[in-house]
Image (cartoon, rainbow, N blue to C red):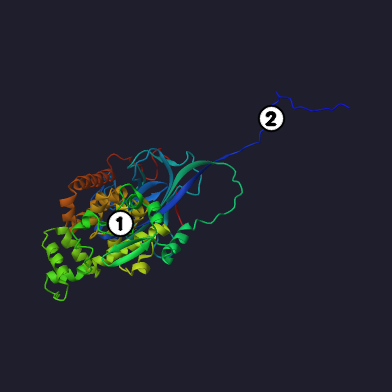
Amino acid sequence: MGTIRVCKDPLKPSTSPITSSTSLTETVNGSHQFKISGYSLSKGMGIGKYIASDTFIVGGYAWAVYFYPDGKSAEDNSTYVSLFIALASEGTDVRALFELTLMDQSGKDRHKVHTHFGRALESGPYALKYRGSMWGYKRFFKRTLLETSDYLKDDCLSIRCCVGVVKSHTEAPKTYSIAVPPSDIGKHFGKLLEGGIDTDVNFEVDEEKFAAHKLVLATRSPVFRAQLFGPLKDQNTQCIKVEDMESPVFKVLSLSLSLSLSLSLSYLAINGKVNMANCKAQKITVLLKVLVVPNRCMMCMMRRYACLNISFFLILIGCLQTLLHFIYWDALPDMEEFMGLSSKGASTLMAQHLLAAADRYALERLKLLCEAKLCEDVAINTVATTLALAEQHHCFQLKNVCLKFVALPENLKAVMQTDGYEYLEESCPSVLTELLHYVAKNNEKSFIASGYGSETLLDGSDGNGRRVKQRMH
């Protein structure tokens, strides 16, 4: 009996599954509340002179609100106040929707609103062509009416700006998935450290010892790997003496890691306020040697330790403990709970030391975490020291944040009067050249906002002559 075999035609194309995708165009929205306090004092500053909000980020671009108390245009003779939203970062043809709202402060919610949102635009969203381009109104509100309205209360104005940056992307159908919890390997390694199981190496700071595991250290840090297992490894790999963890900024404070005496006492001793006769002779000798070093940064940092009532030894111990915690847990501990450091100044000081340690042991993620912490805590009295640290340890993002902060007109003079700035002048003179560049950029921003180099928009319309409807609600 024969067999009949059915064969597919080799020339006939096989059927492929139908695929699909969807292009989505939508807006990434954000808002900024801008409060102007002391409105009456801003009157008379001059036509084209402005009050600017801080920059804020929406859709990956920086924006700023500009309020002109005497108006933006000379032809209006200060009859109207002007209000604009400007692109404050680099960008070309940034398409966006805008809304400017003058808030009613009487509680009646009769806000004055100019908006693109919630209605059809004949020619689509407005496009800002370059940095400094503006959208808004030269004749936003008649000044005499504004000053007798419910929008002005206690000599304050409140302005809300909404920006919707147009973004497009393509999506394919999503497949079903099973949620997987985040990795908890750090928790397991952390328990290994806490339990002290099979530790084979000790860190030594003065008389304090902290146990750890060589393999964990070597896995996390190339510096520890070379120190413990490399061809030029230390002769004694059972004990790591911490002697060079601090940054050059703090080198002048290195009384010796065996000196557990608080620098707060040291500073007071210089002024004759503490009797140190009971201290060990060796420690007094080391202390006196360091105290005669004519270094402004040392005196500045000593005052910081004294004011915060923190010992230098405690900071180094805490720094090492935090370093080990990160190596095992891959996260920073709560510093207030972990070290009892409740003040912002103490946390900043710890983060500065920890940044130097992270760079010393090539722990890049820890270094970034310290940068982020110091970025959040930038202040007049610490920014110069942080800037010097950023320069010495190649923290470019933190450096830029510090430079921008110092370059602000309201900050520059105060920072220049700090001890940290004197040290910055001595140790990092090239940074001062970069600082001048940032100051010049601020002046350029002021020049653009005064009306030169930006698009001048007609009252109540955009650059293409499209009217923007006003509404009250």
- Residue type at tag 2: Ser
| Marker disc for residue 29 | none
| Residue occupying the far top of the picture | 11
7 left or right of 140 in image: right
From where the camera sits, is residue 150 visible?
no
| Residue occupying the far right of the picture | 1
Give the image location of residue 49, x and y in percent.
Answer: 25, 49
Report which residue position mark 1 lands on.
Answer: 236
Q: CA distance from mark 1 to mark 2?
A: 70 Å
310 left or right of 56 in image: left
365 left or right of 305 in image: right
The one of 229 and 219 positioned closer to us in this rendering: 229
Pointer 2 local density, CA inside 10 Å: few below 14, some 14–19, many at least 20: few
Kind of element beneath mark 2: loop
- Residue type at tag 1: Asn
| Residue occupying the far front of the picture | 235
From where the camera sits, is residue 445 visible?
yes
Q: Earlier in the sequence, mark 1 or mark 2?
A: 2
Give the image location of residue 366, x and y in percent.
Answer: 36, 54
Instruction: In the rendered view, tell whether residue 48 sits above or below residue 322.
Output: above
Q: Marks 2 and 1: in contact by CB < 8 Å?
A: no
Give the image location of residue 133, x and y in percent.
Answer: 34, 42
From the image, which quarter does the N terminus lie in? top right
The one of 115 and 86 positioned closer to us in this rendering: 86
Q: How many marks?
A: 2
Query: In the picture, residue 245 is in which quadrant?
Result: bottom left
The one of 294 and 2 positioned closer to us in this rendering: 2
Kind of element beneath mark 1: loop
Give the image location of residue 111, x and y in percent.
Answer: 42, 58
Pointer 1 local density, CA inside 10 Å: few below 14, some 14–19, many at least 20: few
Report which residue position mark 2 lands on.
Answer: 14
Tell which tag, 1 or 2, sits nearer the viewer. Answer: 1
